[in-house]
Image (spheres, rainbow, N blue to C red):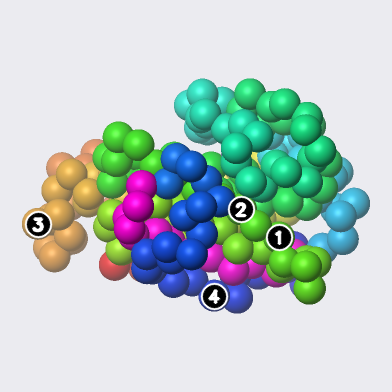
Amino acid sequence: MDKIMRIINAEFGTFSEVEHLNNRFIKNRTKQKLTIDAISPRNKFQVAYQILIRELRRFFPTIEKHDCSLDDASYLMHKGKTKSGPLHNFHDIIDVLHVIEHIMIELQCSVSLMPICSGITCQYFEPRTRYDIFVEAVQKNVAAFSGYFAVNLVKSIIKHGKLQPKFQNMLVLAKFFSKNPSLASSIKKIPKSAGFSLDVFGPAVSDLIRFQYF
Ligand SMILES: [Zn+2]
């Protein structure tokens, strides 16, 4: 089976050693760290990239407005090409990882309601196919969820060529639980107040559990 990429580690912590890499990081703020191995060859990511961008523009229109430029160290390897946002032409696999970083940022803002959030994507020297993503986060469960959600969303778009509705359902539910945390412990009552039918709600809850929201 084509796995495309794999999360090999997920951690929540301060990671102050990376704060100098992005001058927008707030000192000592907690972050979600993801270590990811790219498994598919560069060509597979390149072929899928335009579809990925198209779907993300539709699903997360505000990503285009994220402030992202050369002081984002993940771009240093692009040798001075100025970019105004995270969605741009494909240069290398790191562009896909960087998109994952911005989906995670988007979730901290829309689910945890953080007014400002920054991140960084780094590539290892050895192995070259390994990457670390750090994204500021204040709620440990949303932080972990955002990582699993973003990686699986990108993998799913690459695999299926379009966005699967289950990701939209998951996001609606994650936002609902974050606004109504007391309801998370009595989920039998939720479908009506969340506007979900039971056949959509059950799988969405299972997905949230799988992606470590609970
Ligand atoms: Zn960026």
Residue 9 badge: 4
Q: Quadrant of residue 72?
A: top right
Mark 3 residue type: Ser
Callout 1–callout 2 Cβ contact below 8 Å: yes
The circle on residue 123 is: 1
Query: What is the magenta range?
Result: 26-38
User: 154 or 117: nearer the eye?
Assistant: 117
Give the spatial CA distance, label 4 vs label 1: 15 Å
Q: Secondary structure at mark 1?
A: strand
Q: Position of residue 155 (x, y in %)?
A: 66, 55
Look at discs 4 and 1 and give the one toward the viewer: 1
Q: Nearer the viewer, mark 4 or mark 3?
A: 4
Q: CA distance from mark 4 to mark 3?
A: 30 Å
Q: Nearer the viewer, residue 209 or 90?
A: 90
Secondary element at image label 4: strand
**Ligand 1: does it lie within 8 Å of the C-beta at label 2?**
yes
For the residues labelled 4 and 1, say whether their Cβ atoms are less than 8 Å apart.
no
Residue 121, numbered label = 2
For the C terminus, the image quarter is bottom left
SS under mark 2: strand
Q: Nearer the viewer, residue 21 or 191?
A: 21
Of pointers 4 and 1, the one earlier in the residue sequence: 4
